[in-house]
Amino acid sequence: MKQGVLYGVGVGPGDPELLTLKAVRIVSACDAVCFPEMKSAFEIAHTAMPEIADKEIIPLDLPMTRDAEVLRLGREKAAARIMETLKSGKSVAFLTLGDVSIYSTFGYVRRIIAEQGYETQAIPGITSFCAAAAALGEDLALWEEPLHIIPASYPDLPGALRMKGTRVLMKSGSAIPEVRALLQDQGLAAAARVVENCGMENQRVWKSVNDMGDAKTGYFTLIIIKDE
């Protein structure tokens, strides 16, 4: 029996209308869909394509932790579950927020599955930082301006913030207090724009971190800092 294909499908940052035509076509053609138990990616796709609820649904237990061993075991378990379906000849769409190549769990699971000889393909999606720039009504980069994509947990964040150009801090949610203090220390707070849950119903936008007050933010929060 011919093995199925694993497709990593980026569903965009939150707005179902930001699914690409290719993403819709690939997901429609797949026999099964899988996603982390957080379900955000599935809910976005389901809003745009209610019919995917009739497909084989494979929730994946992929814990959000910094424990390397727990992460490894979770990814291996997810890969094994997906391969059970691929082995039967069914194709699987692995739904992920944003784009599959940017800080995505799909990249780790894909490697495990590819090493076992299965075919995998990546279907790109609109990134959260591009959608956030649109929500802010600002450009990310023009002419020769560099663009830096940095996780808020980056070990040398002070050094990264000193780089010229536009700096995007990804996954800033729980680190906001520390990041805010650092931005204020470097004189960047007024120029730092914040977008939480971009494209989702609970999206929030602040034109400066100084405007946030005591607001608590979630995991899907990013900060954009441009040179003035």
Image (cartoon, helix red, strand yellow):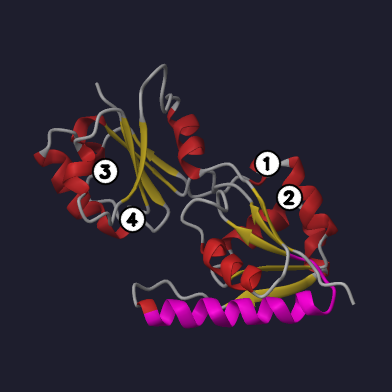
x and y, in percent, of residue 60 in the image: 60, 76
Q: CA distance from mark 4 to mark 3?
A: 13 Å
> Measured from the top left, where is residue 74 in percent x and y?
50, 80
The reply to whether dot 1 and dot 2 touch (C-beta < 8 Å) is yes
Q: Residue at (46%, 56%) from the top-left corner?
A: 103
Q: Residue at x 23, y 34 (%)?
A: 163
Q: Is residue 166 magenta?
A: no
**From mark 1 to mark 2, how far is it between C-alphas?**
7 Å
The kind of residue on which mark 2 rests is Ala
Q: Amino acid at mark 1?
A: Glu
Residues 40 and 21: in front is 21
Location of mark 1 (residue): 17
Name the mark nearer the viewer: 4 or 3: 4
Q: Choose top left, top right, bottom left or bottom right for residue 91.
A: bottom right
Q: Dot 1: what SS?
A: helix
Residues rendered magenta in the picture: 69-92
10 Å crowding of disc 2: few (<14), some (14-19), many (20+): some
Judged from this view, the residue extending furthest toward the left is 185
The mark nearer the N terminus, 1 or 3, is 1
Which is more N-terminal, label 3 or label 4? 4
